[in-house]
Amino acid sequence: PIQMLGQDLNPEQNRTLKPTSKLCGTNYPLSIAFIVVNEFCERFSYYGMKAVLTLYFINYLHWDKDLSTAVYHAFSSLCYFTPVLGALIADSWLGRFKTIIYLSLVYVLGHVVKSTGAIPAVGENVTHVVLSMTGLVLIAFGTGGIKPCVAAFGGDQFEKEHTEERRKFFSIFYMAINAGSLLSTIITPILRGDVQCFGGDCYALAFGVPAALMIIALVVFVAGSTLYTKSPPGGNVLLDVCKCIGFALRNRWRNSSREPRRAHWLDWAQEKYSKRLIYEIKMVLRVLVLFIPLPMFWALFDQQGSRWTLQATRMNMGIVSMLNSLLILVFVPIFDMILYPLIGLCKIKFMPLKKMAIGMVLAALAFVAATVVELNVTKTVVEPPLARESLLQVVNLAEGDVNVAIDGTGLFPHPIGPYEVSKHTSTLFFTLCKFGLAYGFPFLPLPRHCSYGASKCVSFEAPVLPAVPPRTPLYSRRLYKEVRCNAGLKEYSVDLGLLDFGASYTIGPEGLRAFKMLDIQANDVHITWQIPQYVLITAAEVMFSVTGLEFSYSQAPPNMKSVVQAGWLLTVAFGNVIVLIVAEGAGLKQWMEFLLFASLLIVVCIIFSIMAHLYTYVSPEQLDTMFQDGDGGGGGDGNDDGDLKKCQTEQLSLIAVAREKEKCSTD
């Protein structure tokens, strides 16, 4: 007889169970308090470091914006690809508890190396670069490795019958993530800019505080070790899964023509592998197939930190990027304590996949709102010249009108009045003989002599007024009453008035006083118009991300939960890849790009809804009932789905939507 494999792949049978202490008489284990605090500190550590990372690249390492952006996104992508490694280590080798401990040590080491690289006295620029990149790689493996383990480990703390409490735990867990993110993105930029050390911005402190928070996270997690319920690893699960799939494919290829057809292609592995292992692989594959459309949601969601932020820079007042984290802290309890119970009272089965589909629709609506805002923003923003075009601006500093004529063009058809500016964009090729540059701003004073010949050579011979101090091209929006300007041996006290968002001004002398001309109109679309899109995307996140986190845990076999969590996190990584492809390859106007993303997500939502309708919810804990005799042999009729449906009519569903637990029934 052929030896049966996969018999001992149920770590639930060997869980390290302890008398569970409860929180304040509830069904919540005391151990989850340590896990939630650990997650808060770890997310503070991660997002706090990322909040100043791009500025560190540009201002400290002196990289250009393109290189800084590329390294930043490469680091972010690595953080979402490494969860696969952490999941394999947890489920196949060390178990979730030890994996979190060991990779947290790697995480802390990465922070220490990164902070050391920000100390000027450590060495030259090459040393700083090497230390910074080494630290980022260690951080990526640390944070990515523990990502799928911490959430799954938190779910392990609940007893089987407490499914509603476990669902709410994932909401609390998600709130901890956003609370840590919110506080860190406020505090660490303040530490960098407002605290001076080593003669400049204190990047060492801005990176050191997140390192300290990660150390606290590790200490808190270890402090709760005596309270945890720990599931041991189930052996080399991935290897057994791959071998089982490979054997099924080979056996089907060789014998399908000679033997009766089987219900599922994996049933061709029953000659060698246990029915339990085969069914667990079926469960995982069903969930992973559902994950295929999900990256499109993240492609939209993650543009809050890129496209939406750039949109905000062209609007009036500040940036509302922190609004998402704030709204999460408000929306999660509202959805959990008010909205979902009300839907349950209406006898509506609001299953997880339905929530995720509605989350997709809300995200698409958020981008429709962003499209409307973008169309209004572009009306007030002067578009930069396209390729092979130039912006020619003429400033009249004379007392009377000036006519400017360029042969062969219709530019400047009207006279330019005193102290007025006129500008046109055209495909003209000028040979610039003399040009004044005032600290990075092209300033074209009144030409004493202009000649427009065949070569279109423009000669400017007037002095240039240094209207702005060196390396200070941008100002905050406020009134500027007393600004000191030097022009040669003369010093002026200039009243500039209000310098508004997005406007461009030319400042020049007018006798013994200064005048101000408005070159580009200020942005007149207020930043509050972005609030609707943030409200919609945050509601989408609550319904999609929080639900998906719990769904990926609940639908995975006990010995493969971290692997499925890693698959969930991989959808985030591939979502960023979609953004890069569309942004770089499409070449669309921004409002058209927003509309394209919204349309794509609606199409994906329709596909996902069809897949969700065909999906059968399972309870991994029911495997013990289905295979209570140990499944000692191969063969069988392959009718595992029918067995599961019989069990589901007798047991509580793992996925409870209303406050009261409901029995899961399937046709």
Image (spheres, rainbow, N blue to C red):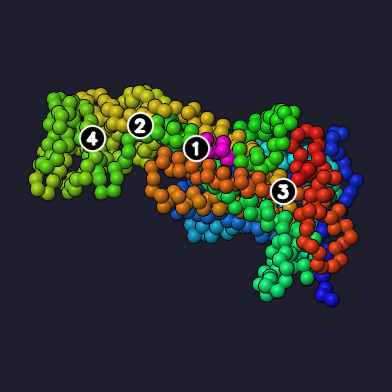
Q: CA distance from mark 3 to mark 1?
A: 32 Å
First-in-chain label (4 vs 1): 1
Nearest to the observer: residue 216 or residue 243: 243
First-in-chain label (4 vs 3): 4
> Image quadrant for the N terminus?
bottom right
| Left or right of 183 on screen, residue 65 | left
The tag on residue 616 is 3
Nearest to the observer: residue 379 or residue 210: 379
Q: Of circles 3 and 1, which is in front?
A: 3
Is label 4 in contact with label 3 (beta carbons under 8 Å)?
A: no
Callout 4, which amino acid? Lys
Callout 1, which amino acid? Phe
Nearest to the observer: residue 24 or residue 15: 15
Residue range in magenta is: 359-366
The residue to which callout 2 is attached is 379
- Look at the numbered disc 1 and give the secondary structure of its residue: helix
Q: CA distance from mark 4 to mark 3?
A: 65 Å
First-in-chain label (1 vs 2): 1
